Amino acid sequence: MLTENQECTIFAKYLRSKKILFTKIASEIWTPSFNQIRKQKLEWLWKGVPDYVIIVPKQNWEKELVFIEMKR
C-alpha cells in the first residue's frame, strides 16, 4: 500500500506530464521550534486548507480551479 507522500508524488508527476498548472500548499512543515510554529500559524499555516490547487484549462481561455485534499 502506498503512503500519502508516495501518492502525492505520483499525482504531481501526472499533473506535470499533462502540463497542468498546479501547486501543493505547504501545510505540513514539521519543526520542533515552538517559535517557528507560532510564526507559521500567524502567517499562513491553517488546518483545513486543501493540499492541492489545480488550474484546469477549459474552452475559450477559460480556467477552472480545483482543490484537492489528499487523505490516507
Image: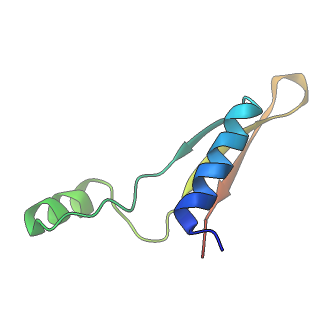
Residue occupying image coordinates x 17% and y 58%: 39
- Please name the residue shown 60% across and 48% down the image: 53
53 lies left or right of 57: left
Nearest the eye: 29 or 2: 2
- Give the percent coordinates (x, y) of residue 46: 38, 65
Decide if residue 8 is in sight here.
yes
Q: Is residue 63 above or below residue 48?
A: above
Tell whether 7 sits left or right of 26.
right
Q: Taking 62 as reference, is 66 left or right? A: left
The reply to whether residue 20 is visible in this rendering is no
Depicted 47 relative to depicted 23: above or below: below
Residue 64's place in the image compared with 68, above or below, is: above
Q: Position of residue 38 (x, y in %)?
A: 16, 65
Quarter occupied by residue 30 = bottom left
Q: Residue furthest right?
A: 59
Q: Quadrant of residue 67?
A: bottom right
Horizontal and vertical percent position of residue 1: 66, 74
The residue located at (77%, 33%) in the rendering is 18
Residue placed farthest to the front in the image? 1
Tell me where residue 2 appears, x and y as whole percent. 63, 68
Q: Nearer the viewer, residue 52 or 31?
A: 31
Quick one: 2 or 25, which is closer to the camera?
2
